[in-house]
Image: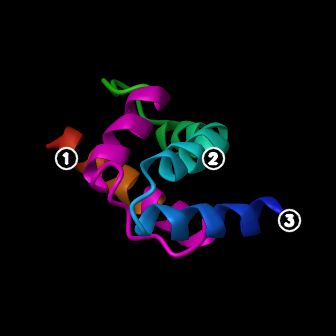
Amino acid sequence: MTEAGEITVLLDAAHKGDRGAMDRVLATLYQELHTMARRQLAGQHGQTLDATALVHEAYLKLGGGQLAAQDRNHLLALSARAMRQVLVDDAR
């Protein structure tokens, strides 16, 4: 099974109440989310957040383990939007 397919299966299990499944999704995608956060922070001077903090704040903004993502791409899109919202909130 591809990583994307595995993520979709795990997300489905998480929606059915398997908390361990969401943990495995996040562990699998953490490095990619961290890279995404570094890209979003690039060129921003005086930023109080680092990439790790941005990933964690975005996770909390998305509702923690209660993510409504349907598949890998949807989860990454929701995460990117949440990261942008965290940066805007932090700038205020």
Three-letter amino acid code of the residue under disc 2:
Leu
To which quarter of the image does residue 74 belong?
A: bottom right
Reply yes or no: does residue 56 show up in magenta.
yes
Q: Is residue 37 visible?
A: yes
Number of labels in the image equals: 3
Of the 4 image quadrants, the one containing the C terminus is: top left
- In this view of the protein, can residue 32 be seen by the observer? no
Q: Residues within 10 Å of mark 2 (few under 14, many from 20)?
A: some
**Which residue is label 2 attached to?**
29
Q: Which residues are magenta?
A: 51-79
- The residue tagged 1 is 89
Q: Residue at x 65, y 37 (%)?
A: 31
Disc 3 versus disc 2: nearer the observer: 3
Looking at the rendered structure, the secondary structure element under dot 3 is loop
Residue sitting at x 49%, y 51% = 22
Q: Quadrant of residue 78?
A: bottom left
Please tell me which residue lies in front, 8 or 21: 21
> Residue 26 colored magenta?
no
Return the residue at label 3: 1
The residue type indicated by label 1 comes to Asp
Q: Residues within 10 Å of mark 1 (few under 14, many from 20)?
A: few
Give the overall secondary structure of the magenta segment: helix
Q: Say what secondary structure mark 1 lies in.
A: helix
Mark 1 vs mark 2, foreground winner is: 2
The image shows residue 73 at horizontal and vertical percentages of 61, 70
For the residues marked 3 and 1, what is the alpha-carbon distance in whole angstroms? 38 Å
Looking at this view, is 28 or 84 the one in front? 28
Distance from the alpha carbon under mark 3 to that under mark 2: 16 Å
